[in-house]
Image (cartoon, rainbow, N blue to C red):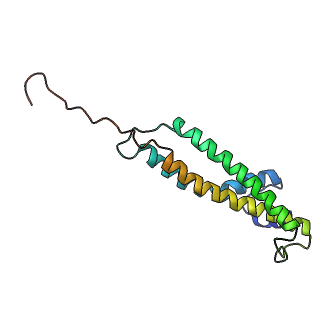
Amino acid sequence: MRRIFHCFSSSIFRTESPTLLGIGWGIVATWWVGTFFGVLLILAARAGNRVPLRASELLPSIARLLAVMTVVALLSGITGYVLARQGILDTDWLTFTDSPAKRYRFMANWWAHTASYAAAFVGGIVVWTAGRPQNAVSPPRAAIHCSSGQP
């Protein structure tokens, strides 16, 4: 598995460290999701006639979403591994290795990865739509009156 991972990463990252490769590919593979939902959060926080939200007011919702994503990814990865190991999930189609243990770990990774994206997508929509108080409307602008009697 490591050999396959290195084949695809040698042109982008000049390291053999699995940790650095994981961090690097995590950023390369997911930046677009963060950008997409970041723009939506900016619009939700600033657009319209509601009181604008500061970034610090969005952080608790984002932190909760990241915690939920972590738990969902962990549980899904464990589930994928157990199901593959018990033979419920077929791993014979994974032709990159003959080792069943490596295929089980691949399934764990795949399930965790997919579940994390799903949780981010659903949770991002929830944070975007429900994270804003619907009744917080900016007060209307007061008319400016001249005291000199001129309009």
Total marks placed: 0
Nearest the eye: 99 or 112 = 112
Q: Is residue 6 visible?
A: no
The vertical placement of 109 against 42, above or below, is: below
Which residue occupies 63% across, 42% down? 63
Q: Quadrant of residue 104?
A: bottom right
The vertical placement of 120 against 58, above or below, is: below
The C terminus sits in image quarter = top left
Q: Quadrant of residue 149?
A: top left
Return the x and y of residue 69 as percentages of the image width and height. Answer: 67, 51
Q: Quadrant of residue 45?
A: top left
Which residue occupies 9% across, 22% down? 148
Q: For this view, does 145 lie left or right of residue 140? A: left
| Residue reaching furthest to the left | 149
Return the x and y of residue 1 as percentages of the image width and height. Answer: 85, 65
Q: Is residue 62 visible?
A: yes
Nearest the eye: 120 or 9 = 120
| Residue reaching furthest to the top | 147
Which residue occupies 73% across, 54% down? 73
Return the x and y of residue 99 as percentages of the image width and height. Answer: 92, 70
Which residue occupies 68% across, 56% down? 116
Return the x and y of residue 144 as percentages of the image width and height. Answer: 19, 30
Q: For this view, does 1 lie left or right of residue 60? A: right
